[in-house]
């Protein structure tokens, strides 16, 4: 069976031995980037990281970032069309970690639904570690841009991975027959929307383990084919 990480919608590219590497659009350096452009990008991201650490993501404007980095506003916005795009670039290392762990689970084998649960556990940790940046990504997509958060390569990869794992679970008799994996994928990811997740953690006082245990019972156990092992 083809690598689930290379399924349609991943927007990735093939590496050695058919392996998939993360798409550069996650926030990495564009292919063929000039040295001066690469240095400018690194300087902007470094300055943004420092300012966000000192004052918080919400308190820092794109204008301040460009000025502190010595980059003109036109250049800054050609590189990052809004603050959310810049924050997405800062999330690149964390996204690479998510991808790497998903790839490791695939290579080690095991039931598809358990691999899916591993992805959800990683995503919960990712939410907690990167909440301010994820919030800025969300805030940048108001109005007509609201659906951009579902079009970005990170969400596209998450969704494609969930769809492929669910499809594999159906094929191998782990999940019930006739499951609409395309529609169910959004329902699987929705409980880990960063706003809802942080509300449960901070406002309702729920621990991460409690939330994930509830998700396992509601989503994964509910998807299993009757009679399969839990």
Image (spheres, grey):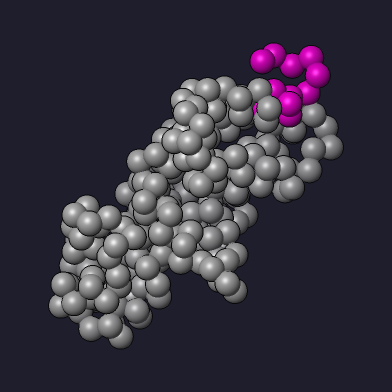
In this picture, is 30 found above or below 3? below
Q: Nearer the viewer, residue 215 or 56?
A: 56
- Is residue 157 left or right of 39 when viewed as pictured? right
Q: Residue at x 61, y 29 (%)?
A: 215
Q: Residue at x 80, y 29 (%)?
A: 176
Is most of the magenta stretch helix, strand or loop? loop
The quarter of the displayed image where residue 9 is located: bottom right
The residue lying furthest to the right in this view is 178
Q: Position of residue 119 (x, y in %)?
A: 51, 35
Write down the region rendered in magenta: 220-230
Whether residue 132 is visible, yes or no, is yes
Whether residue 66 appears in magenta in the rendering, the answer is no
In this picture, is 63 found above or below 88? below
Q: Position of residue 84 (x, y in %)?
A: 41, 64
Could you tell me which quadrant the N terminus lies in?
top right
Whether residue 229 appears in magenta in the rendering, the answer is yes
Q: Position of residue 203 (x, y in %)?
A: 48, 36
Could you tell me which quadrant the C terminus lies in?
top right
- Is residue 37 left or right of 113 when viewed as pictured? left
The residue lying furthest to the front in this view is 203
Whether residue 13 is visible, yes or no, is no
In this picture, is 151 found above or below 214? below
Q: Nearer the viewer, residue 91 or 113?
A: 91
Count of numbered marks: 0
Q: Position of residue 151 (x, y in %)?
A: 56, 62
Q: Nearer the viewer, residue 207 or 185?
A: 207
Q: Residue at x 51, y 47 (%)?
A: 195
Q: Residue at x 36, y 51 (%)?
A: 132
């Amino acid at each position: 069976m083809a690598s689930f990480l290379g399924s349609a919608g991943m927007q990735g590219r093939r590496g050695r031995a058919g392996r998939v590497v993360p798409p550069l659009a996650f926030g990495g350096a564009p292919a063929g980037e000039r040295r001066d452009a690469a240095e400018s990008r690194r300087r902007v991201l470094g300055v943004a990281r420092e300012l966000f650490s000192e004052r918080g993501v919400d308190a820092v404007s794109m204008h301040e970032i460009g000025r502190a980095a010595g980059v003109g506003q036109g250049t800054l916005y050609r590189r990052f069309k809004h603050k959310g795009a810049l924050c997405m670039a800062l999330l690149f290392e964390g996204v690479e970690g998510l991808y790497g762990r998903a790839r490791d689970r695939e290579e080690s084998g095991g039931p598809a639904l358990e691999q899916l649960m591993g992805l959800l556990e990683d995503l919960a940790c990712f939410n907690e570690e990167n909440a301010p940046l994820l919030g800025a990504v969300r805030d940048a997509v108001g109005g007509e841009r609201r659906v951009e958060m579902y079009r970005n390569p990170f969400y596209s990869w998450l969704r494609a991975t969930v769809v492929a794992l669910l499809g594999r679970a159906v094929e191998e008799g782990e999940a019930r027959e006739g499951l609409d994996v395309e529609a169910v994928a959004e329902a699987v990811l929705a409980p880990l929307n960063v706003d809802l997740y942080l509300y449960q953690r901070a406002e309702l006082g729920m621990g991460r383990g409690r939330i994930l245990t509830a998700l396992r019972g509601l989503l994964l156990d509910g998807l299993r084919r009757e009679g399969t092992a839990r």
